[in-house]
Image: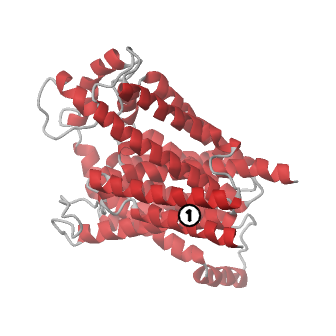
Amino acid sequence: MLQLKFGSIIFALLCVVLLWAPIPVGSNRPWAWSLLELMIGVVFLLHLANSCRSMGPALWHRWFWPLLLPILLLQLYLLLQMSGYLPFLHSIDPKQTEIMLIKGLFFLMWIQLVCIYTNTAFRLRMLVLMMVLSGFVQAFYGSVLNLAEVANSPLFAVNEAGRARGSFVYQNHFANYLALCLAMALGLLLSELSSQPPQWRFKAMLRDFVTSLLSSKLMLRLAIIVMVIGLVLSRSRMGNAAFFSSLALVSLLALFFYKRPPALLKPLVISILLLDMLIIGSMFGLEKLQQRFVETSFASEARDEVVIDSLPILQQYGWQGSGGGTFYTVFPAYQPKVYSGFYDHAHNDYLQFAIEVGIPMTLLLGLMLLWSLWQNLQVMRTSDHKLHRGLAFGCAMATVHMLIHCTVDFNLQAPATAMLYLTILAIGQRLYSMRFEKVRRN
């Protein structure tokens, strides 16, 4: 009984850390990510103490290796780069590589904690609800400041510049964070829909309407609406495009993979794609987002120049990498001119990872994401649990969104966003492992 209570306390602390991560400027400042690492470290020490008391698993189960092994290999690779023991493998800025290594080690601890302590349907649901709550708070805060035309945010005095950004400094990180929370919220909502065809009799429709008003689905739907508003107000072109593209693509896949799909799956997707986008967008500035799409040109986009000017770095360091976290150290030597903005990242996560840790390691991480996506589809196809199928839909949608959005931004360089996505990957791995654990128990 005491062991169960201690495990519940650790899980509650995980939820607190997840809620805290985006609040201090997305944990994207040295003091902020150091505090986040401290919080993760404390929870992990409590986990080790709990494991010693109960003789439970201190590290990962074999079902979690497909997720944990590539990330562990990345940390070992960063350690080799930082140490410089191998003449052909060294970092040009060991201090930056050390910072990235420390972040990665704490993220590895975080993934283990999520995999171990989300061992019941109740905890899975609660963790996803914490994601939805975090996204709702960020969207509400960012939308209110934007609609009130506040110049600088009350927290940390971040310049709003006419775009919703929540507690993040960079609006595209804010949009990416909301898109990930939205994906899981939609998966949770999908898990609560009935697979039975709707009844069109007046009495049955009235009963279903009243039931929905009194259920948690209404609050979840309202949270989704607020997050869509925040996403539109961020004016993030690829953030919005990637979200709605991932929703359409995964919904199409669900029609083929989803076991006993909910009868209202198609109406739900159509309502998100059309009603929310048109009605909410017309009220909260969709035309400004459209204007940004129309007015964008390659000539005015310095981000495209950064990507093009970074290609010679890839030619030189493509196999072994220049060292984790060293993009800004190496890039000025290849920069032909001064850009209009400050660019310490490549604005393309694929390119930046390939430059810093090499193409082979980047391909390994990419295979991990594709394997995770395949696992999500398998859970949608074979699981008998409605919650598992719905959350697998959300995990798949989050991965497709990241695969698209990372082509034009550096979302994985923001600790809060990276931690949220790793949490989603861990949930997907946990959902997949539950299928085998159930077979083994039977």
Nearer the observer, 203 or 48? 48
Total residue callouts: 1
Q: Looking at the rendering, in which quadrant would you find the N terminus?
A: bottom right
Q: Is residue 318 left or right of residue 117?
A: left
- Quadrant placement of the C terminus: bottom right
Label 1, secondary structure: give it: helix
* Residue 407 x %, y %: 39, 36
Whether residue 374 sits left or right of residue 95 in the image: it is right
Q: Is residue 388 above or below residue 216?
A: above
Dot 1 alpha-carbon crowd within 10 angstroms: few under 14, some 14 to 19, many 20 or more? many
Q: Nearer the viewer, residue 39 or 354?
A: 39
Answer above or below: position of 136 versus 261: below
Q: Is residue 91 left or right of residue 425?
A: left
- The percent coordinates of residue 126 (x first, y second) are 58, 68
Counting from the top left corner in percent of width and height, residue 37 is at: 40, 53
Residue furthest to the right? 442
Question: Which residue is drawn at the image coordinates 65% and 43% (left, top)?
Answer: 64
Q: Which residue is mark 1?
A: 127
Tell me the quarter of the picture where residue 84 sits.
top left
Q: Amino acid at mark 1?
A: Leu
* Near-viewer residue (438 or 148): 438
Residue 346 appears in the figure = no
Work out whether residue 179 or residue 293 is closer to the camera in this orientation and state it.
179
On screen, residue 40 above or below 303: below
Look at the image and tell me whether residue 162 can be seen.
yes
